[in-house]
């Protein structure tokens, strides 16, 4: 049996490598594989479904893995003052940490924080700039004001890219990613408002202005992938905003069902990889959140402590079916 | 920057969204093809993919989950989910007649292909669980014997034996079918 199994394995390996030839006494066995060949034509996971599934997966990760995502509780200044954690999570440069410590120690917070606002990505004070933005977001309780601040931050990210492009400096990929996070969060918060139109209009105006600025930057650096991504984020935000202005309920469903955290109580860390926006589609989610029907699939809401992770296959030695 | 699987998993444990996103991007298409080949149902396949990743997150939260061989781990979870579903609706998986009826329900374009798939799937489900996985993981998903062995928690020699027995079973089925005997 072992010899047969080895020979058959070698024959299958050859066949998988595209070497179709007579394998003698093994041919009848290999015919079994050919009988299964129609299964090879499985449909592909289309890009939109995958994007929606990815969005849902990352949204769940924020809920399921709260130990890191959840560290940034709003208004939790204990977290804010945990410098070691800040260093790790925001990837502050050592210089920025040193500056922050010195500044806090000697009371020059305002001056340094102000100076940091003009900094660009990869500059020493840029980490501090992001932290101050986080603090401002933490202190903003009113959702409409939150949208205003997020649109301001989105505009800042675009401005940074424009300035970097004008200086012929590389644009880190984190910048368009942060832009996307700000846009997504602004849309999510606006969608949750009872009267979202004013905030959506505010987002729309900002997107238009930043799209124009970005177009100028792209004329300077036409092949820059970060600028291209930023343009795509703005285009998508524009489409979602227009959808919300036409049909707020549709935007609400889109944002809450498959994308950013629906409640404005969860803010993305400016220094983490951000939440991305859902694709503006009129179709319901083709890749649902894993909340399968109880009759279809077990345990979607099982407690993790009770979750038996598979260590083997069901019916190990028996039939594939019960 | 390309990260190794071990690095991706380590970052995923730290809830690094970039790592989690990369994992999803890499494995969701593969899981989709795998689950579809087993089930033949697109809606179920999407659910299985989503649920597989959800359970992966739960495992990470509980401190479990894979330290390596992520593909094998995800395939294993997805297989469990499809089998769980099949246990609830076994006829559609077991019966060639049922499969053909389902395939004929939409006699439009691609009806012949669907029928051929239904026949192949019905044959596949006549195999044992481990035989099914060996065949699909190796022959369709392109896993090596070592990776299949990891997915099945079996030695490589056992994988070869399972493969051999699976093909022998398929040959018997083909013979019976040609003789007009229902498998």
Image (spheres, rainbow, N blue to C red):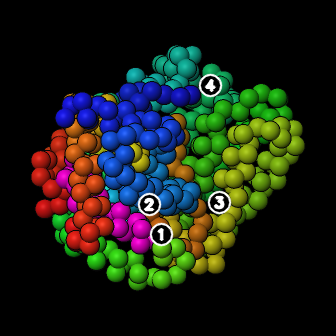
Q: Name which residue lies at 52% across and 81% down.
A: B108
Disc nearest the viewer among 3 and 1:
1
Res. A237 mark:
3
Chain bearing tag 3 is A
Q: Secondary structure at mark 3?
A: helix
Closer to the camera in the image, B98 or A272: B98
- Asked if the residue under mark 2 is in contact with the one under mark 1, i.e. CB atoms within 8 Å, the reply is yes
Closer to the camera in the image, B36 or B119: B119
Labels 4, 2: one chain: yes
Closer to the camera in the image, B106 or A275: B106
Which residues lie in the magenta part? B113-132
Q: Disc 2 designates what residue?
A: A38
> Is residue A200 rendered to the left or right of residue A2?
right
Q: Residue B78 location, x and y as percent?
A: 30, 52
Q: Residue B26 location, x and y as percent?
A: 47, 43
Q: Residue A88 location, x and y as percent?
A: 44, 25
Disc nearest the viewer among 3 and 4:
3
Disc nearest the viewer among 4 and 1:
1
> Is residue B146 rendered to the left or right of residue A134?
left
Q: Is residue A49 above or below residue B53?
A: below
Compute the Cα span from label 2 to label 3: 42 Å
Q: Name which residue lies at 76% across and 52% down.
A: A210
Crowding at mark 2 (Cα within 10 Å: few <14, some 14-19, many 20+): some
Q: Disc 4 designates what residue?
A: A125
Chain bearing tag 1 is B
């Amino acid at each position: 049996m072992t010899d047969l199994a080895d020979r058959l394995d070698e024959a299958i390996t050859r066949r998988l490598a595209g070497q179709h030839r007579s394998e003698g006494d093994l041919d009848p066995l290999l015919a079994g594989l050919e009988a299964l060949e129609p299964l090879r034509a499985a449909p592909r996971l289309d890009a939109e479904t995958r994007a929606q599934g990815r969005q849902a997966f990352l949204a769940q990760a924020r809920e399921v893995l709260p130990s890191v995502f959840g560290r940034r509780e709003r208004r939790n200044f204990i977290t804010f003052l945990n410098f070691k954690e800040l260093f790790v999570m925001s990837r502050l440069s050592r210089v920025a940490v040193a500056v922050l410590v010195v500044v806090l120690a000697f009371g020059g917070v305002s001056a340094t924080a102000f100076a940091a606002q003009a900094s660009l990505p990869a500059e020493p004070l840029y980490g501090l700039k992001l932290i101050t933005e986080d603090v401002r977001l933490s202190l903003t309780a009113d959702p409409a004001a939150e949208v205003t601040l997020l649109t301001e931050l989105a505009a800042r990210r675009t401005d940074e890219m424009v300035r970097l492009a004008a200086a012929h400096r590389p644009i880190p990929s984190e910048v368009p990613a942060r832009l996307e996070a700000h846009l997504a969060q602004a849309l999510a918060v606006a969608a949750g408002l009872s009267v979202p139109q004013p905030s959506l209009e505010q987002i729309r105006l900002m997107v238009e202005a930043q799209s124009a600025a970005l177009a100028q930057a792209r004329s300077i650096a036409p092949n820059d992938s970060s600028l291209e991504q930023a343009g795509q984020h703005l285009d998508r935000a524009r489409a979602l905003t227009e959808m919300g202005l036409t049909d707020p309920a549709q935007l609400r469903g889109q944002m809450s069902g498959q994308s950013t955290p629906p409640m404005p109580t969860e803010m993305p860390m400016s220094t983490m990889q951000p939440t991305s926006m859902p694709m503006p589609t009129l179709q319901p989610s083709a890749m649902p959140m894993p909340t399968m029907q109880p009759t279809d699939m077990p345990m979607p809401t099982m407690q993790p402590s009770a979750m038996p992770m598979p260590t083997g296959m069901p019916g190990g030695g028996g039939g594939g079916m019960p | 920057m390309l990260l190794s699987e071990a690095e991706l998993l380590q970052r995923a444990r730290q809830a690094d969204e970039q790592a989690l996103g990369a994992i999803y991007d890499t494995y969701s298409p593969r899981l989709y093809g795998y689950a579809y080949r087993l089930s033949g149902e697109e809606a179920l396949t999407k659910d299985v993919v989503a649920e597989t990743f959800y359970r992966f997150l739960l495992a990470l939260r509980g401190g479990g989950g894979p330290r390596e061989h992520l593909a094998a781990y995800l395939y294993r979870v997805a297989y469990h989910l499809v089998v769980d579903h099949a246990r609830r609706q076994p006829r559609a998986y077991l019966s060639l007649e049922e499969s053909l009826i389902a395939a004929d329900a939409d006699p439009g374009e691609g009806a012949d292909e669907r029928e051929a798939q239904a026949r192949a799937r019905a044959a596949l489900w006549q195999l044992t669980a481990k035989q099914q996985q060996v065949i699909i993981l190796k022959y369709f998903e392109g896993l090596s014997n070592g990776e299949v062995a990891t997915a099945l928690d079996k030695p490589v020699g056992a994988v070869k034996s399972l493969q051999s027995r699976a093909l022998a079973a398929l040959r018997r089925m083909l013979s019976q079918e040609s003789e007009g005997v229902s498998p």
